[in-house]
Amino acid sequence: MALVNLGGLLHHALKHGYGVGAFNVPDYETLQAILDVAVEKRSPVILDVAEVHLKYIDLEEVAYVARRAAERAPVPVALHLDHGETFETIVRAIRAGFTSVMFDGSRLPYEENVARTREIVRICHACGVTVEAELGRVLGGEGTRERFEADPSLFTDPDQAVDFVRRTGVDALAIAFGTAHGLYRGTPKLDFPRLEEIARRTRIPLVLHGGTGVADEDFRRAIALGIAKINYYTQLSLAGIEGIRRALEEDPEIGSYPLLLQKARESIRAVVRHQMEVFGSAGVCDRFPDLCVACEQCFPSSEPIEEPRPCELSTPEAPSERLSEPQLRQLVERVMRAVLEELPRRNGPA
Ligand code: 13P
């Protein structure tokens, strides 16, 4: 059983100076390619299911398949909702068995982002699910050939980051410091002093979005300064297309659709392999053979967290808000109500 949430995974990465790749999963081929390489490279990995990709895959179905595959993989795997924007999607993800979620309130006014993130954190923590939030704004759009650049006026403010982490209790924070989703217009210039200050003052694992197009050296420097999770997608998508293009050029008469998909999978694997080497996560499971066991001890199941468990992988400085018994009950009731209201809507009339 290697399904874990972000808690132990990212604190371990932070402590030991490597980054965990969070690769988007818009289809089954990509899912398999990512897991194949994680197992081959003995690397922890995060399967990122983005809300924008729910037009390609069903949240509950992909969760079922991903959980099953992850449980069989002998490396730690987190199943994470990427850029969740609505309360309903977050609740569906919890119910479907995601081990962590991102609530992206970066478009909201600051106080609203704090209030909504805080509410999501309370609900998720009551269910044993970890939460990533975003502060500042990482622009762009992944998965196409369109080019974007970062806007320094939207970079994360360090003072605000400290306040945000303290008031919300998030487990990981996505920050804007020079990256953008999708391909870059020009060369990305990362604001390392800003990253260093936010990492030093918040002391929680930070997340880099918009990994495609960032130079290997910049990744290494960002990880050394406090980035523990790296979101990476567009290059996987382009590699899949390239694999298919090459296969069709080599054999225009190819008659096997699954074989064609295999070619896409091979190309995606090559990109994931390279990135895991660059992030330093390759070989981590050999360096720390009890990693899965340790993570399971932190977060053994999706039951509510009742007592904090002593764990060498968690930092005592990480803010966490304990809920009283009535508060906890109230939250669980609220989630159950939301789930029950959602069910008839999704399933149609009984
Ligand atoms: P890229 O597509 O630019 O690699 O970014 C992916 C991402 O940040 C998903 O959240």
Image (cartoon, helix red, strand yellow):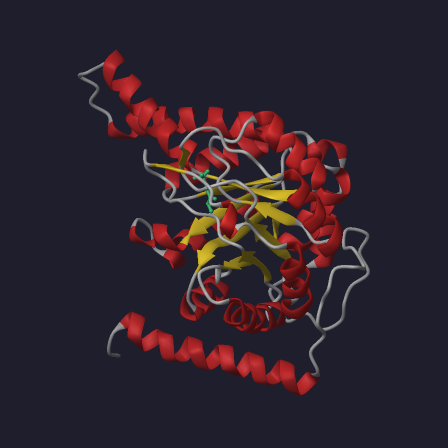
Which of 217 and 101 lies nearest the eye of the viewer?
217
Q: Position of residue 240 (x, y in %)?
A: 36, 29
Query: Quadrant location of the C terminus?
Result: bottom left
Which of 104 and 157 lies nearest the eye of the viewer?
157
Q: What residue do we see at 63% from left, 80% from top?
A: 328
Question: Residue 166 falls in which quadrant of the image?
Answer: bottom right
Q: Is residue 259 left or right of residue 223?
A: left
How many numbered discs?
0
Residue 143, above or below 136: above
Residue 218, above or below 225: above
Q: What residue do we see at 35% from left, 74% from top?
A: 343
Question: Residue 342 falls in which quadrant of the image?
Answer: bottom left
Q: Is residue 279 visible?
A: no
Q: Outermost residue, top direction?
A: 250
Q: Position of residue 306 (x, y in %)?
A: 71, 73
Q: Is residue 16 visible?
A: yes
Q: Position of residue 67 (x, y in %)?
A: 50, 51
Residue 230, above or below 159: above
Q: Outermost residue, bottom direction?
A: 326
